[in-house]
Amino acid sequence: MIRRSLKFKLILYTYLFVVPIITLVSAFIFVKDYNSSKQKTTEECLRDLSDLSSSVEDIKNNMKTYGTYITINEEIQNILDADNTDSLNKSSTLWYSEAPMKVLEDMIALDSSIKTMAIYPENKIKPYLRCFDESSYLSKEKIISTVEYISALTKKGAYAFTRADVSQNSFYESIRTPKLVLFREIYDMSRKKPLGYLCIGSNADVLDDMCKGLVVSEEDAICVYGIKEKKLLSLEGNTESYDEYIKPSLESGTIPSPVTDLNDKLLFSDVTEDLIVAKVVSKADFYDSPGKVVAAPLTLLLGIIIGLIPVLLIITNSILKPIKDLSDGMDEFKEGNLDLTLPIKDKDEIGSLTETFNGMVQGMKDLINKNYILTLKEKESEIAALSAQINPHFLYNTLDSLYWRVLDAGNEEIAEDIMALSDLFRLVLGHGERFVTVSGECDMLKHYLHIQKMRFGENLHYEFNIEKEAESVTIPRLILQPFVENAIVHGFEKEQGDFKLEVSAKIISGKASFEITDNGRGITEEELNSLFIEDSKSYRAERVGHFAIKNIKERLEILYKDEYDLKILSEIHRGTTVRLTIPITDPAD
């Protein structure tokens, strides 16, 4: 079975859950954006066609304004209806003196779109022919034979529009630029009589430029078609597309719908009363390709997938790091570290688990301390003492025999020393007892100091100040002796002079308080710190109870936890003071 880490599983399952959802969302966004893009592009195209229709209508209405002015002007009507044509034709300024053509030309000068204007009277008056762009109109003899002239007669005053190109037209002898031409018969409605033929030419380049602006692709084609005249007013773009898609619809006389799907092409149209503006485009070029539209959701999908990696790493690390710390702590605890306490960073399930683990470690430590370490520490002194003798009773009996023999010999001082040594051994071994009274511990100290006087003689002075209430208090055996022994070995040895040592005990605030003071050489800070590590083998072998200061501190921590207080105060050449305060407890507990 392949072993995968929890981090790998979290990241994998997140992607298995998130990626399908993001994919569905991206697909939805793609479809929505694609349809929205198609609708928006269609609306923009129809709006452009509508704007083009409006622009063409504006051009036509502008031309109609001038045409209407001419047809209803009374002075022009009088010229067209005059019978005295010969006399009128004698005036070279007929149209300027008898009609307001100068005013009309000034108006046209302000309007740059109108380029030509012609009035062909039916009463043999000389025609009014005016071109502002170096074009020239056909003569009356030629104009009356054109299709447009004949068509105007049949319409009896109705406006019509057509396109006059440079290569082919029915209005101009010469023409420099194509024109959009308004033509109509000036007709006397009351007498049912034609009065003249009116032609107004506007620059078709303006219309062509507007159409060119709407041709984007080489496949596009756009046209403006006059419905009444059945005439193409403008055509731009691909003529093949016009011939294949637009022209058949126009020639059939059917009004195309705004959007017609022609397989690979699209036909858009805007229809007014007079015009059809149509545009054919390539469907592939007109709509954004799916590849372009899919770019946004695909980018979103890839961005989220890639962006999830650092986010998931941060999240998984925040979740898994406490678990790893807990696992490492368990391994460390398994190796025997009973002082381990893991930090609790968050009050969540992992924090609760860590708190439970810390409690388990502390509980295990307390259990081991109570049932194993304490027993082991106390047995060490007994084993050490027992290993130094063949039989305690043999030792006691031997010392007693020596005591009586020396006493019989009359050497009472040596006899007392032997007796003190015998009592010291009895008290140190303690018959296996773990606790003694304060008075019992002090008796043992007195015997120990009596023996030490054999070394120091009259230079050693000691004093015990034990309150009556404190004598019966039960304390751990050999809890004071190591401090007294430490004062002798480290404070008095290798020194000269009178050595004083005082041991006091009293009850303060319900606790037993002890103080051991000497006037020895004192202890440096480095030596003070070294008291709480293991003694050297040589010094450990000289100890009576085999307990070092470090052992005393460990026993106090096991027995009283943080309810005891131990302080060692010292100054070089000024002596040392040990202060110990412990709770008063029942040994049965």
Image (cartoon, rainbow, N blue to C red):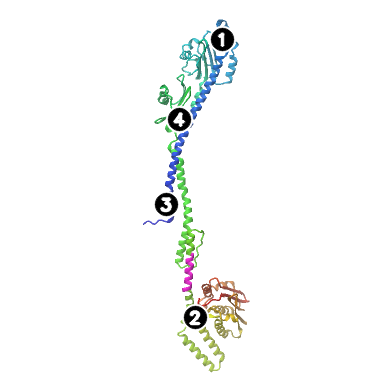
Residues packed near mark 2 inside 10 Å, few (<14), some (14 to 19) or many (20 plus):
few
Amino acid at circle 1: Ile
Q: How far apart are the two marked residues, 4 and 3, measured between alpha carbons?
A: 49 Å
x then y, percent, for residue 279: 45, 27
Residue farthest front in this picture:
190
Q: Can residue 496 be seen in this view?
A: no
- Give the alpha-carbon distance from disc 1 to disc 3, as whole Å: 96 Å
Label 3 sits on a secondary structure element that is: helix
Q: Which mark is residue 433?
A: 2
Other-residue count near label 1 (Cα within 10 Å), few / some / many at <14 / 14–19 / ≥20? many
Sooner in the amino-acid sequence: mark 2 or mark 4: 4
Q: Distance between the residues labelled 2 and 4?
A: 111 Å
The crowd level at tag 4 (other Cα within 10 Å; few <14, some 14-19, many 20+) is few
Q: How far apart are marks 2 and 1 (CA)?
A: 154 Å
The residue carrying mark 4 is 217
| Residue to which mark 3 is pinned | 13
Q: Is residue 352 magenta?
A: no
